[in-house]
Image (cartoon, rainbow, N blue to C red):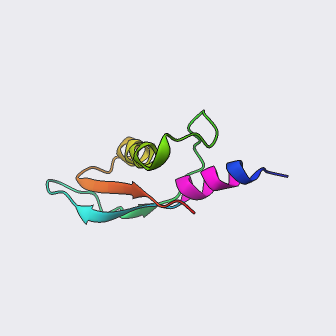
């Protein structure tokens, strides 16, 4: 069975969404779910680290011009 920390990490990475438009060319993507881990388990570096990971994943998927935020549960 998965540990609570692993489930929390999955929930965070699975619920990245964008609340704000920052201008420029944007993709139509406004929400995404991922199973990609950070390589450090549930240690994401707090909210700022979780948001940075979310932005990294979104930009890697080709989405730019949005302010991506992670939803933690």
Q: Is residue 43 magenta?
A: no
Give left or right: position of 24 versus 51.
left
Between residues 42 and 10, which one lies in front from this camera angle?
42
In the displayed image of the protein, which residue is found farthest to the right?
1
> Vertical placement of 36 versus 33: above or below?
above
> Vertical placement of 41 versus 12: above or below?
above
**Residue at 62% over, 43% down:** 42
Residue 15 rendering spot, x and y as whole percentages: 51, 61
Residue 11 rendering spot, x and y as whole percentages: 60, 58
Residue 68 rendering spot, x and y as whole percentages: 35, 55
Q: How many marks?
A: 0
Between residues 64 and 9, which one lies in front from this camera angle?
9
- Magenta-drawn stretch, dominant element (helix, strand or loop): helix
Give left or right: position of 52 versus 6.
left
Residue 21 rendering spot, x and y as whole percentages: 22, 62
> Vertical placement of 36 versus 31: above or below?
above
**Residue at 17% over, 54% down:** 25
> What range is drawn magenta here?
7-14
Quarter residue 36 falls in? top right
Give left or right: position of 7 versus 17.
right
**Residue at 69% over, 48% down:** 6
**Residue at 39% over, 49% down:** 58
């Amino acid at each position: 069975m998965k540990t609570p920390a692993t489930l929390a990490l999955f929930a965070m990475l699975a619920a990245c969404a964008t609340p704000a438009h920052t201008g420029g060319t944007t993709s139509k993507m406004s929400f995404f779910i991922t199973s990609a881990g950070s390589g450090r388990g549930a240690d994401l570096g707090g909210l700022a680290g979780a948001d940075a990971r979310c932005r990294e994943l979104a930009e890697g998927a080709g989405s730019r011009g949005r302010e991506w935020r992670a939803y933690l549960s």
